[in-house]
Amino acid sequence: MVIDWGVVTPPLFEVDDLHVAVEGREILRGVDLTVNLGEVHALMGPNGSGKSTLANALLGNPAYEITGGRIRFKGEDITAWSTEVRGKAGIFLAFQYPEEIPGVPVTQFLRQALSARRGMDLSVLELRVSIMEWMKRLGMDPSFGDRFLNEGFSGGEKKRNEILQMAILEPDLAILDETDSGLDIDALRVVASGVEEVRRARPELGVLLVTHYQRILERLTPDVVHLLVGGRIVTSGGPELASQLEEEGYEAWQ
């Protein structure tokens, strides 16, 4: 529990002894994780360690079966909640490989997503000022909003679009699944700066960043770094743990 000005409040997000199976094969074997308001947590680990499995399970992907443990959001057990309900409650997942949706402009997609989040039908007109403002803050061309979602987007554009979605939807917890995957140095800088811009606007936003590499953590400094190996978090530490892993690799922990 976190004590704030004498008032006891639950952590923003808790994972307690989580076990997850995919097609009958256990991938996560007892994961414990706590994210408090405003914290950035980095989850690192080798290929096949279960990082993306954890991200999908936390958002309620039905292909990932929770066979044990609990997930709590703001103190409430959400283990059995659907993806839609979790999203409406304020949990956001930025995908490693965002899907293309031909025929649906970015602005229209944002309208539908925010309408679902707020439980009311919003018009694009109501959102346009906010969308334009955030595009400017994220260094995006205004014409971007008229393009079909992720169709013909570069890797950097897809990831920047995910950050735009995060800004507009105003979640309480953002799970960024390998947002740095496939990005060059310039695109990485833009994405990391975008996440920081959203955090400045929403300082209580909790972030769980799933990544292979230290390079994004040089621009987006985590409060806690976790190492996931073999379906379990084997150690946690500060930013220095990411530097150690960069230098030594994962072999010593496997």
Image (cartoon, rainbow, N blue to C red):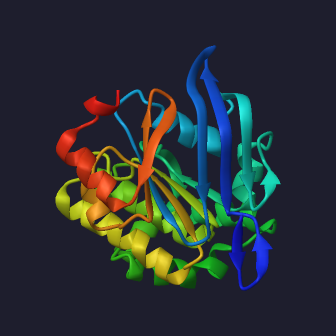
Residue 224 position in % (x across, y down):
45, 59
Q: Residue at x 77, y 51 (%)?
A: 85
Between residues 252 and 58, which one lies in front from this camera angle? 252
The number of numbered discs placed on residues in the rendered structure image is 0
Between residues 107 and 103, which one lies in front from this camera angle? 107
Residue 71 position in % (x across, y down):
72, 45
Q: Is residue 24 left or right of residue 151?
A: right
Q: Is residue 205 left or right of residue 239?
A: right
Q: Is residue 220 above or below residue 72?
A: below
Please indicate, yes or no, whether residue 196 appears anywhere in the rendered image. yes
Q: Residue at x 62, y 78 (%)?
A: 127
Q: Residue at x 74, y 41 (%)?
A: 70
Q: Is residue 75 left or right of residue 212?
A: right
Q: Quadrant of the C terminus?
A: top left
Please indicate, yes or no, whether residue 64 appears anywhere in the rendered image. no
Residue 228 position in % (x across, y down):
44, 38
Q: Is residue 252 left or right of residue 171?
A: left
Q: Quadrant of the N terminus?
A: bottom right
Q: Is residue 176 above or below residue 64?
A: below
Taking the view exactly as shown, the residue that stands out farthest to the top is: 24
Q: Residue at x 55, y 79 (%)?
A: 203
Residue 157 position in % (x across, y down):
34, 58
Q: Is residue 107 above or below residue 47?
A: below
